[in-house]
Image (cartoon, helix red, strand yellow):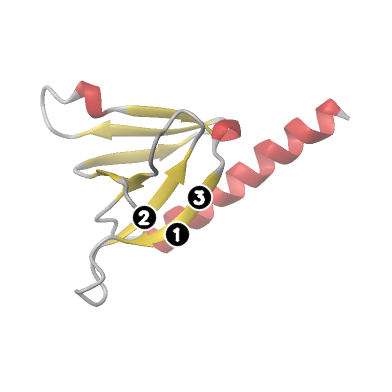
Amino acid sequence: MPTDYIRNGVLYVTENYLCFESSKSGSSKRNKVIKLTEITDIQKYKVLSVLPGSGMGIAVSTPSTQKPLVFGAMVHRDEAFETIFNQYVKITSAASNSES
């Protein structure tokens, strides 16, 4: 799966957004703000399949991305994934219920 690999920064989850802040100075173009309701797919992703236990990331797809965004080199990938996924389910369920 071709991806847009993003690393060297901090990933934040808020009530409605997934935000990435690049830690490289002058890299504001790599900062990302994604509305949770716009996520079409989220998966655990292993960036470097040749190295066991390393290269762990999270792949996120939205209608506006041509290829999934992969937030990589995550130390606590599983915990981050659960947090993002749980908030995604919460916000999309609330949106579905308000439309009914």
Q: CA distance from mark 3 to mark 2?
A: 13 Å
Mark 3 secondary-structure assignment: strand
User: Label 1: which residue?
Assistant: 79
Kind of residue at disc 1: Glu
User: Label 3: which residue?
Assistant: 42
Mark 1 secondary-structure assignment: helix
Which residue is located at x 35 percent, y 41 percent? 11
Residue 1: mark in rendering: 2
Position of residue 89 in the picture relative to residue 15 (left or right): right
- In x, y percent, where is residue 37? 60, 32
- In x, y percent, where is residue 80? 43, 53
- Does the residue at mark 3 contact the one at mark 2 (Cβ under 8 Å)? no
- Place residue 100 in its image quadrant: top right
- Alpha-carbon neighbours of circle 1 within 10 Å: few (<14), some, or many (≥20)? few
Taking depth in this image into account, of 90 and 51 the one nearest to the observer is 51
Kind of residue at disc 3: Ile
Which residue is located at x 47 percent, y 42 percent? 61
- Does the residue at mark 2 contact the one at mark 1 (Cβ under 8 Å)? no
